[in-house]
Image: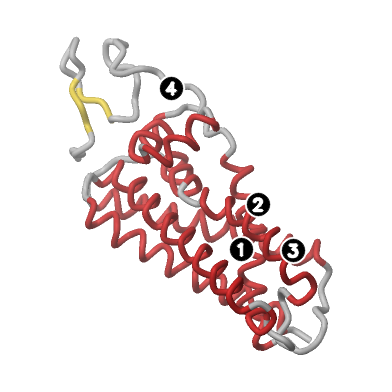
Amino acid sequence: MSYINEIPCSNCGSLNFDYEYKCKNCKSFLRERIVNIDLGETLLRLIDSPSEAFYKIKLSEHKNYVLFIALFLSIRFLIISRFISVPFVYNEIQFSLLLLLGISILLTFSVLMLISFISSKIFALKKIKTRFKDVFSVIIYSFVPSLLALFILFPIELVFYGEYLFSNNPYPYQIKESVFYFLLVLEIMTILWSIFLLTSGLNVFLKSRFLSFILSISIWIIIAVALFIQSKIFLIQ
């Protein structure tokens, strides 16, 4: 079976997949070898040149910080799930924070791995050969804006609303309405930024902005459903 992401070796003409840095036949170098992901450089590139950043993430041999980012992402998803449950929770949460965090970590990793697996299969249908770790890493790094929301927006929200941040009596917007809507807009912007980054990341594989955008929206729908399901944990009495 031929794949569209096979490239010929300039030395012997043998076909190699685009993620290989050495020709499988003559061992000549096909491209520059990328061993590790430079976190600082990658974060800057995600702002000014996302395609270049995701290209290096895809080709790097070691996927540095991926598990680290996924771990903090599970905390972010737990917070979002708690927000979703706010209108329906009238009693104190029955579970410990550690148990809730454990559930969120398990669900987050499961969903992200499932999404990566499905994406890999879609790429295969388009005759694009990929490595699972490349797809998983690109998807994980597209959620960097969520980490910014976790480390910047969430503390600000705690400062303004304190114990009433997850309250429905009163709701946060009833305390400081203008601040609430301003922070809500920033939260929405981080999600839109993540969708943009995910589209750019998937485009590194698909080479089609339209298909990448459709797949990005589909992935975010899956994540939204997972977060809604996770929010039901807070309703267990």
**Quick one: label 3 or label 2, which is nearer the N terminus?**
2
User: Amino acid under label 2?
Assistant: Phe
Q: How is the image coloured?
A: secondary structure
In three-dimensional space, the C-alpha distance between marks 3 and 4, rounded to whole angstroms, equals 42 Å
Nearer to us in this view, 106 or 82: 82
Please determine whether, in this image, residue 134 is positioned above or below residue 25. below
In three-dimensional space, the C-alpha distance between marks 1 and 2, rounded to whole angstroms, equals 13 Å
The residue indicated by pointer 4 is 34
Q: Which quadrant would the C terminus be assigned to in this image? A: bottom right
Q: Quadrant of residue 131?
A: top left
Nearer to us in this view, 147 or 221: 147
Q: Quadrant of residue 170?
A: bottom right
Residue visible at 82% across and 82% down in the picture: 92
The residue indicated by pointer 3 is 159
**Quick one: label 4 or label 2, which is nearer the N terminus?**
4
Please determine whether, in this image, residue 61 is positioned above or below residue 147. above
Tell which tag, 4 or 1, sits nearer the viewer.
1
User: Amino acid under label 3?
Assistant: Val
- Residue 73 is situated, as x and y percent measured from the top left of the image, at 60, 54
User: Amino acid under label 4?
Assistant: Ile
In three-dimensional space, the C-alpha distance between marks 4 and 1, rounded to whole angstroms, equals 31 Å
What crowding class fits label 3: few (fewer than 14 Cα within 10 Å), some (14-19), or many (20 or more)? Answer: few
**Quick one: label 3 or label 1, which is nearer the N terminus?**
1
Tell which tag, 3 or 1, sits nearer the viewer.
3
Residue visible at 36% across and 50% down in the picture: 120
Tell which tag, 3 or 4, sits nearer the viewer.
3
The residue indicated by pointer 1 is 77
In three-dimensional space, the C-alpha distance between marks 3 and 2, rounded to whole angstroms, equals 13 Å
- Residue 231 is situated, as x and y percent measured from the top left of the image, at 64, 76
In three-dimensional space, the C-alpha distance between marks 3 and 1, rounded to whole angstroms, equals 20 Å
The residue indicated by pointer 2 is 151
**Quick one: label 4 or label 1, which is nearer the N terminus?**
4
